[in-house]
Image (tube, rainbow, N blue to C red):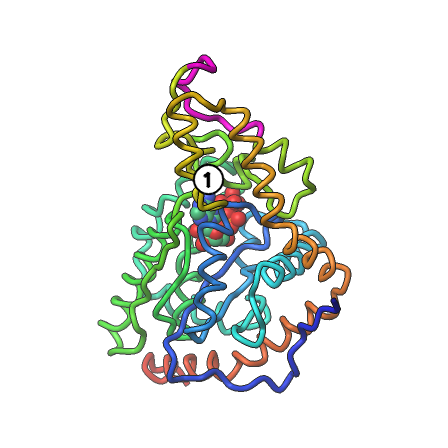
Amino acid sequence: MALELAPSPALAPLASERPRAFSGIQPSGIVHLGNDLGAVRNYVRLQYDYDAIYCIVDYHALTTTHDGTLLRERTREMAASLLALGLDPEHCTLFVQSDRPEHTELAWLLATVTPVSWLERTPTYKEKKLNQPDDVNHGLLTYPVLQAADIVIYKATVVPVGRDQAAHLELSREIVRAFNARYGPTFPEPQAVFTDAPVVLGTDGVRKMSKSIGNTIDIFGAPELIRKQVMSMVTDTKRILRTDPGRPAVCNVCQLHRHFGADYEEIWDGERTARTGCVDTKKLLAERIIAYYAPARERYLELISKPAMVDEVLAAGAARLKPLAEATLAEVHAKMGLR
Ligand code: AQP
């Protein structure tokens, strides 16, 4: 079936009577299971009831990625991934952050109401300082201010994210309160919304699934890769022998089965009674993940072979947002006393 994605450049204006949702995702390579279960599923769901705006945050990616060619490729790949996973340009606006430079201007304005101490205590800043000690750039510190600008420039009230973003969202709310207190009511306080899997653990079964840790399951990877990643998963560490009863509540493989079949309780029962071993449960999970994502993977591969189509969607998205971003900036300029 031919893919028909590109909307006409004269997209309808955003329907202002609907509440607005916004979220950003980094163009940092592969899309993993944590991204989908923790956030992208909600992007797809919300697009039907909200004015949903989704942004590929390449400005943010510059804090960790310094290869221009790679960043450009990954930005398009992320767009193709999101479209393949179900974002529909007729129901949402998908664009690239650097195509709307008003975000960075608003970030500067918001920075003037944001105490440095708020930024220094951000958990991700502390983490990144440890992870990239030779590159503690200013962008890492000020990242949450840009994130707040991304959201509030469209006056979004709902932000679908994984739980790892909760602290950033709280900071966005504090920045909004600080701005509104100084210059009068301007921005609504955005609320995070989570899926039923707000923190997906990685293959190590301990830490959040994350590309920088390298504990991911790559949903658009080749089936052999997905099998290898799932088979490497750490299960219940107290289940040493095949005959030991398993504990589904602490087994990451069992927990992930919840998202890939209505029969997960039966699978858990098999583990609890040691009827099934961890290897069987992992094999089944791998096959289910492969089958579940196969249609999206096919769409992804097709989209990535048609870059012009993807670029057109992104350009139309950015064009559609221009009046909104400019209106917010004009309002902020007036309130702050800028000419
Ligand atoms: N493990 C996860 N569980 C639940 N939600 C998650 N998200 C990411 N990992 C998990 C959510 O996915 C959205 C996009 O996140 P991002 O832009 O931070 O993307 P990422 O770069 O893919 O996240 P990583 O892998 O954790 O990146 P690194 O390792 O580079 O820091 C967000 O809503 C996020 O909450």
Where is residue 286 shown, x and y percent of the image?
58, 37
Q: Say few, some or many: other residues with alpha carbon within 10 Å of mark 1 (under 14 / 14 to 19 / 20 or more).
A: some
Residue at 39% x, 30% y is 269
Where is residue 319 shown, x and y percent of the image?
59, 80
- Magenta-drawn stretch, dominant element (helix, strand or loop): loop
- Give the residues in magenta: 231-243
Residue at 54% x, 60% y is 57
Residue at 72% x, 70% y is 309
Where is residue 214 shown, x and y percent of the image?
56, 35
* Position above or below: 172 against 218: below
User: Which residue in the rendered view is the most extreme toward the right?
Assistant: 305
Q: Is residue 237 magenta?
A: yes
Q: Is residue 130 left or right of residue 82?
A: left
Tell me which corner region of the image, top left, top right, bottom left or bottom right, holds residue 279.
Answer: top right
Residue at 50% x, 50% y is 35
* Position above or below: 183 against 242: below
Q: Quadrant of the N terminus?
A: bottom right
Q: Is residue 107 magenta?
A: no
Q: Is mark 1 within 8 Å of ligand 1?
A: no
For the residue pair 137 and 186, the one nearer the viewer reads as 186
Residue 138 visible in the shown view: no
Q: For the residue marked with disc 1, what is the amino acid?
A: Leu
Q: Is residue 66 left or right of residue 139?
A: right
Q: Is residue 137 left or right of residue 224?
A: left
Residue 331 visible in the shown view: yes
* Position above or below: 309 against 276: below
Query: Dot 1 corresponds to which residue?
Result: 256
Mark 1, secondary structure of its residue: helix
Tell me which corner region of the image, top left, top right, bottom left or bottom right, holds residue 177.
Answer: bottom left
Where is residue 213 shown, x and y percent of the image?
52, 35
Q: Quadrant of the C terminus?
A: bottom left
